Amino acid sequence: MDDDDEILDSAPISKSDEELEKGFVAAIVEQPKLMDELAKQLVALSLAIPGIYATALKLLAGDDAVASSLPCIIGAFVFWALSLVFAFVSLTPRKWHVERTMLRRNSTSKNGAPLSIEEFFIASARYKRALLIAATACCFVGICLACVAVFTATPPNHPVPQPVKP
């Protein structure tokens, strides 16, 4: 008998292996949905923080503080707006070129080639993750700029210290 003619033993998949594969597939399918939930939370956070910040700054520091730290305040609101844009884009449906009859393939698809169904779920999650990382970073930078504006603002009814003239 030749080495090429060797008969390999086979057996049905065990129950534990079958459950592991189902869990793996479910995790892949659920990733885009989890990213959507994260995006919704980030949108809520990006909408709430500027309102709370503006109210707190007005109540605690007054009109003078806003004028003295205006560049940081504008920067904070710009970054919060960018955070919202990235989060909304991640929630917007995107057209993907998918080969509906191919569940998975052994190698990754080439540029321009249709994605397998498994590749679609992975690519969708990666796309959303990249946008949400950018949205989170923008939100964080906005919070940092807001903190700088609060801690460098001149309190109301306190004059800005002037250098002593000799």
Image (cartoon, grey):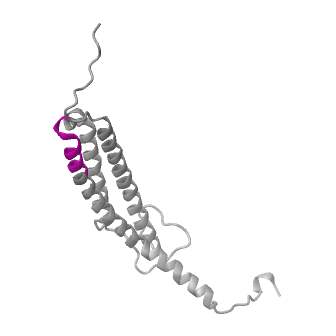
Q: Is 77 in front, or is 155?
A: 155
Instruction: Decide which of 158, 72 is in the foreground and name it.
Output: 158
Q: Is residue 30 or residue 123 the one in the foreground?
A: 30
Q: Quadrant of residue 4?
A: bottom right
Q: Residue at x 41, y 69 (%)?
A: 114
User: Is 37 displayed left or right of 14 in the figure?
Assistant: left
- Name the residue at the bottom extreme: 12
Q: Is residue 46 magenta?
A: no
Q: Which residues are magenta?
A: 53-64
Residue 103 visible in the shown view: no
Is the residue 120 above or below the residue 126 in the image?
A: below
User: Relative to residue 20, is residue 160 drawn left or right?
Assistant: left
Q: Quadrant of residue 159?
A: top left
Q: Residue placed farthest to the left in the image?
A: 63
The residue that appears at 50% across and 76% down in the rendered structure is 104
Q: Taken as a whole, is the magenta stretch helix, strand or loop? A: helix
Residue closer to the observer: 19 or 105: 19
Report x, y in % for residue 131.
Answer: 37, 57
Quadrant in which the N terminus appears:
bottom right
- Number of marks drawn: 0
Point 32% across, 47% down: residue: 142
- Left or right: 23 as drawn, with respect to 146: right
